[in-house]
Image (spheres, grey):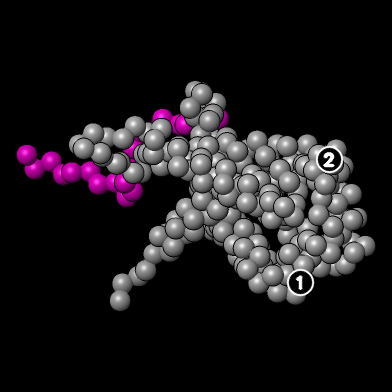
Amino acid sequence: MGKRSFVPLFWTLFSVGGVVAAFLIPIHLFLFGLAFPLGWIQPPTYERLLALARLPLVRLYLFVLCSLPLFHWAHRFRYTLYDGLQVKHLNELIILGTYGGAIVGTLVAGYLLWSL
Amino acid sequence: MTEKPVYTEFHPRWYRTRVSTYWWLDRTPYVKFILRELSSIFVAFFVVITLLQIRALGQGPQAYPAFQQRLQAPIMVILNILSLLFVLFHTITWFNLTPKAIVLRVRGRRLPDLLIAAPNYVAWLVVSGVIAWIVTGG
C-alpha cells in the first residue's frame, strides 16, 4: 500500500468548515456578540437557553459549529503564514499549532457539550 | 576535446529574486486576498468565545450572567464588530466563488455568475432567520 496523503482530508475539512462558517457564524456573532450584549434584542433567559442547548440535535449542531470552522481556520491560517510571512521553515511547528489547535478545540467542544 | 568537465559538489543556485515579506501590500487584489485569509483568525476567535459561552452555560445561573456582562466590555464589543466584518467578508467571498467552481448551462448558454451565486445568499438569509427565530423564541 502506498503512502497516503492527508492533504485531501484536510482540504475537505477546510472546505466544509468554510461553508459552515459562511452560513452560520454571521448570525451567531450578530446575536450573541452584539445584539444581546448591547440590548438591541431581548436575550433568551438562562433556563431557556440551557434547555435549548441540551437538546441532542442542538448539541450536535453546536459541535459542528465549533469543530469544522476550526479546521477551516487551521488550513487557511497555515497557508497565510506561509504566503504572508514566508515562514515555510517552521513547517512542523505551524502544522502542530494549526491542526493540533483544531483537534484540541474539537475535543474541548465535545467534552463541554457532552457534560452540559 | 578531452578537457575534463568541472563537477561541483552541490547543485548550483538558481537565480531567484527575493520576494518581500510585504509583497501583498503591492496591489489591492493582494491586500484583499490577505484580508480574506486573515478572516480565519476571527472565525477561530468566534469559536473560542462560543466555547467559553457554552462552558459558562454549563456552570450555572450565576456564571452565565457574569459571562454575558464580560461580553459588554468595550474591547469585546469592538472585537465582535471586527469579527463580524471579517466573517461577512469571508461569507461574501466564499459565496462568490461558487460560479468559479460550477459552470451551469441552460440551452447551451452559460448562466451568469450572479445567478449561480444568488441561491447561496437566499439560503443564507433563510438559515439566519431560522436560527434567530429559534434562539429568540419566536
Residue farthest to the top, as pictured: B27
User: Residue B56's x, y, as percent?
Assistant: 83, 62
Does the magenta portion include A84?
no
Image point 70% across, 74% down: which residue?
Answer: A114
Q: How crowded is the residue under tag 1: few (<14 C-alpha within 10 Å), some, or many (20+)?
A: some
Image point 84% across, 41% down: which residue?
Answer: A39
Q: Which residue is mark 2?
A: A38
**Of callouts 1 and 2, the N-terminal one:** 2
Mark 1 and mark 2 residues within 8 Å of each other at the beta carbon: no
Residue toward you, A49 or B71: A49
Side of A20 relative to B4 (left or right): right
Hey, what amino acid is under mark 2? Answer: Leu
> Which span of residues is magenta-colored?
B1-22
Image point 74% across, 55% down: which residue?
Answer: B137
Hey, what amino acid is under mark 1? Answer: Leu
Task: Name the quarter where the C terminus of chain A is drawn.
Answer: bottom right
Could you say which quadrant of the image residue B50 lies in? bottom right
Residue farthest to the right, as pictured: B62
Note whether B76 is above or below A68 in the view shown. above
Q: Chain of mark 2?
A: A
Note whether B79 is above or below A20 in the view shown. above
Does the magenta portion include B15?
yes
Work out whether residue A14 can be spotted: no
Image point 70% across, 36% down: which residue?
Answer: B82
Name the secondary structure under disc 1: loop
Side of B86 relative to B117 (left or right): right
Tag shown at residue A116: 1
User: Residue B17's x, y, as percent?
Assistant: 41, 30
User: Residue B103's x, y, as percent?
Assistant: 30, 41
